[in-house]
Image (spheres, rainbow, N blue to C red):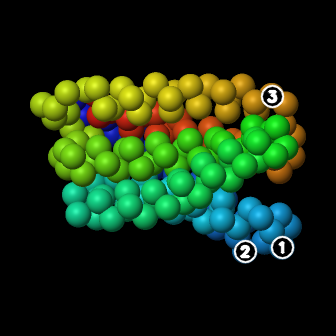
Amino acid sequence: MLLPVAVRAAAIAAMAAVAAYHLLRLRARWRVPGDVALDLTHLAMAAAMVAMLTGRTGARAGMWEALAFALPAGWLVVRAVRTYVLDGVVGSLAAQAAGCCGMVGMLALSVAAPTSMAGMAMTSRPAGPAVLLLVPMAALTVATAAALRRRTGPELLARGCHVLMAGTTTLMAAALL
C-alpha cells in the first residue's frame, strides 16, 4: 500500500506551510521570547517530515534525526511536567512534547524498516509499533482540533499549526500499518 500521491502532496504542502509560519515567527519581533525553542523544534520537525514524505530520509539519517529529536522531546516533557506540577496547567508544551515524542517514534520506525518511509510503502513487519504511534497521535490531533474553537487571532494560527503537525504525523503513522 502506498500513500496516494495527492494525499502525500497535501501533507508536504501542510508541512511547508508549518515551516514557513515558524520561520516567520523566528524572524518576527512579536514572538514571545520563550517560544524560540518551540518554533525551532516545529521548524525542524516540519523539515524532517517533508524529507520523509519525499523519500529523502534513509536509515542512517533517520537514526541521527531520531536521536536529534530525542533531546528536545525530553526537554519538552520535563518543561510540560514542571509547568503542570508548579502551575497546574496542561497546555501547548504538553502537546508539543507529545508531537516531538511522536516524531522520535516515527523516525525510529523508519530506521527499523527503512523501506516504509520512502514512498510510504507497506512492509512485512508487524503493525504493533505503528499502532502504538497512531493511537496517541490521532488523540492529540482530535484534542488539538477541538481546542481551535476557543482560540482567536495569532493563537488560532499557532493551534492550527499544531493540528497540521499532529494530523500529518497521524497520517504518516497510518501509512506505516
Residue density around tag 1, few if under 14, some if 14–19, many if 20 or more, within 10 Å: few
Q: Depth check: give the residue in front, 112 or 158.
A: 112
Q: Which residue is mark 2?
A: 27
Q: Amino acid at mark 3?
A: Arg
Give the label on residue 149, or none: 3
Secondary element under disc 3, as helix, strand or loop, is helix
**Is residue 19 at all visible to an observer of this figure?**
no
Relative to residue 72, is residue 11 depicted above or below?
above
Q: Residue furthest left?
A: 124
| In the displayed structure image, the side of residue 75 where residue 90 appears, left or right | right
Q: Amino acid at mark 1?
A: Arg
Q: How far across and how far down the image is residue 122, in percent? A: 20, 33
Q: Which residue is mark 1?
A: 29
Q: How far across and how far down the image is residue 69, in percent? A: 46, 59
Q: How far across and how far down the image is residue 1, in percent? A: 22, 29
Q: Amino acid at mark 2?
A: Arg
Mark 3 and mark 1 lie on one chain; the one further toward the N terminus is 1
Relative to residue 4, is residue 14 depicted above or below?
below
